[in-house]
Image: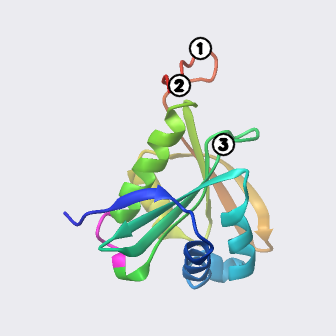
């Protein structure tokens, strides 16, 4: 198995590379999200951004939101084209889930209605659909809210730091 190291996204150059990588991929192409908007999201201090590297190259990125009603929300995940179909997406998701489960029993994400490959991927990882946000980001495209859970909020005991 190819080595994959996951650490916090730290530099502007890393963030710019990831923003360009995302902007050139689905669902961001269809949603019209350019690299400038994605760079702002990656640099948002209210989010947790993690970089995956393999063989000293950026292989992917995951952006996590731990605030708000859906505490434990995976806002974005992207694997670079060269590194796709090698299990890196699953490994990034596993990392994000464990990061979130240390403090919340729920992991949430949205997937675009047109992104059927991603829907299948998330279902295979144990996510279930809990709602549909009609025309949420752009007209004619829905966002499907999905959840993976270890139980209800009440009574959940986060892991000790």
Q: Position of residue 113 (x, y in %)?
A: 62, 66
Figure quadrant of the N terminus: bottom left
Q: Report the magenta residues as a range.
A: 83-87
Q: Report whether 39 appears left or right of 5.
A: right
Left or right placement of residue 40 versus residue 85 in this view: right
In the image, 57 versus 105, the foreground residue is 57
Q: Residue at x 62, y 78 (%)?
A: 16
Q: Nearer the viewer, mark 1 or mark 2?
A: 1
Are dots 3 and 1 in contact, CB under 8 Å? no
Q: Callout 1: few (<14), some (14-19), or many (20+) C-alpha neighbours within 10 Å?
A: few
Q: Is residue 20 above or below residue 151?
A: below
Q: Disc number at residue 121?
A: none
Marks 2 and 3 sit apart, C-alpha to C-alpha, by 17 Å
Give whichever of discs 2 and 3 has the lower sequence position.
3
Name the residue that disc number 1 marks: 155
Element type at mark 2: loop
What is the spatial separation of the Cα atoms under label 1 and label 2, in whole angstroms?
9 Å
Q: Answer whether residue 161 is magenta in the image.
A: no
Q: Kindly tell me whether residue 32 is visible in this rendering.
A: no
Mark 3, residues whose alpha carbon is within 10 Å: few (<14), some, or many (≥20)?
Answer: some
The majority secondary structure of the magenta stretch comes to loop
Q: Residue at x 50, y 32 (%)?
A: 102
Label 1–label 2 contact, CB within 8 A: yes
| Residue 119 in the image, given as x and y percentages of width and height | 50, 61
User: Relative to the observer, which residue lies in front, 39 or 81?
Assistant: 39
- SS of the residue under disc 1: loop
Q: What label sits on residue 66 in the rendered view? A: 3
Q: Residue at x 74, y 80 (%)?
A: 36
For disc 2, the marked residue is 151
């Amino acid at each position: 198995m190819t080595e994959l190291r996951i650490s916090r996204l730290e530099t502007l150059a890393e963030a710019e590379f990831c923003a360009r990588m995302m902007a050139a991929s689905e669902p961001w192409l269809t949603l019209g999200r350019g690299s400038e908007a994605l760079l702002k999201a990656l640099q948002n201090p209210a989010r947790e951004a993690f970089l995956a590297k393999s063989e000293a190259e950026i292989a992917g990125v995951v952006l996590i939101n731990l605030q708000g009603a859906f505490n434990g929300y995976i806002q974005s995940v992207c694997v670079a084209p060269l590194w796709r179909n090698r299990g890196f997406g699953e490994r990034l998701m596993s990392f994000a889930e464990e990061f979130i489960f240390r403090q919340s029993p729920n992991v949430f994400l949205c997937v675009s209605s047109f992104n059927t490959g991603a829907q299948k991927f998330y279902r295979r990882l144990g996510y279930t659909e809990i709602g549909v946000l009609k025309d949420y980001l752009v007209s004619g495209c829905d966002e499907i809210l999905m959840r993976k859970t270890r139980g209800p909020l009440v009574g959940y005991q986060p892991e000790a730091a």
